[in-house]
Amino acid sequence: MNFTDSDGDSRTADALRAAHLYYIQNLTMDAIASELQISRSSVSRLIAFARDSGLVEIRLHSPIDQLTQLQHQLHERYGLTAHIVPAGDAATEVDRLDRVALSAARILTDFVDSNMILGVAWGSTIASVSRHLVRKPVRNTQVVQLNGAGNAHTTGLVYASEIIGRFGSAFGATVQQFPVPAFFDDPATKDALWRERSTARVLAVQRRMDVAVFGIGSPNADVPSHVYAGGYLDRADYDELSRSQVVGDIATMFFRADGTHDDIPLNDRSSGPSFEVLMRAPRRIAVVSGQAKLPALRGAVATRAITDLVVDEVTATQLAAME
């Protein structure tokens, strides 16, 4: 059996066969090794490859467990579909983020199909999601960047394009980048650029998106949100956000604890999609981990911009308990 990268088709076929014997026929790894005439460790690697590459999808269904009850609570209270990732108190924030990102990547695979537009907002959380994506080539699908990434220190092109590029590669999709600043110095400059045909073309794609995926930015997270840690905001901006009682952002569009987002001056300078544009997408997936993001998450939920929430167990429990 050949395991070299140059023989990917052969390895995929071998992995499919090993996975079928293991999951469908319930053979032991020793029995599979004997049938395929390979070592037990080779069987283990094939089955792991089948899981990691998306050939095998494992689902858990339980109508009575605690996570299911929590999902029902969040749906009844907030009208969203919660995908809760087990991660106890002992897990570090970095580990919690990795688990949530891995689950979000798998969940997103189910939602993306041919002839769709997927909107992606860059950020620390979505960068983690992009590294766990499973290949699912589809046809005539576009991935569009939702907000610009440039600031006074960097164009942001490398950071944002790597994230958007991973989504495009995973789904075999066309990538529409958005090479504009994250925040403009003057709203008039933004208005002028938005009238340019090259920019208007990307904005038109954003308005037609079927699925949007984004993290929730928070200035207080243990794993810092990139917009707050990457040199995008200066002291005057922070003072302005404080005066506006901002608790977080979605795609660099800011909101308050009650979900309102009107009359926040920085939103007039942001390149992110307005909440009106964002909510045109039938499915809007927020990916969140960490208790420090709870105030921002509660505000984001109050905007009604989230249809699906991928979140760790501890944070979900606290969200359900909030008054």
Image: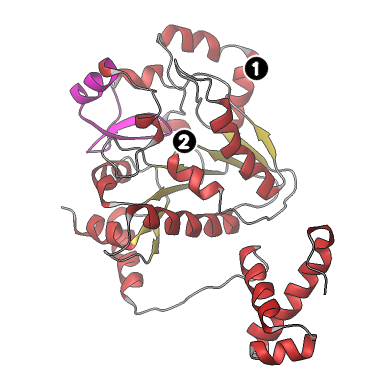
Q: Quadrant of the N terminus?
A: bottom right
Q: How is the image coloured?
A: secondary structure
Residue at 27%, 33% in the rendered image: 260
Gap between marks 2 and 1 measured at Cα: 20 Å
Category of crowding for the residue at label 1, using alpha-carbon neighbours closer than 10 angstroms: few (below 14), some (14–19), many (at least 20): few
Total residue callouts:
2
Residue at 20%, 25% in the rendered image: 242
* Viewer-proximal residue among 157 and 140: 157
Look at the numbered disc 2 and give the secondary structure of its residue. helix
Q: Amino acid at mark 1?
A: Ser
Label whose residue precedes the other's in the sequence (2 or 1): 1
The residue that label 2 is drawn on is 278
Report the side of 190 relative to 249 (left or right).
right
Q: In the image, which residues are magenta? A: 236-263
Relative to 201, residue 250 above or below: below
Residue 206 visible from this viewpoint: no
Relative to 245, residue 189 above or below: above
Q: Position of residue 31 (x, y in %)?
A: 70, 92
Q: Position of residue 96 (x, y in %)?
A: 37, 57
* Viewer-proximal residue among 197 and 106: 106
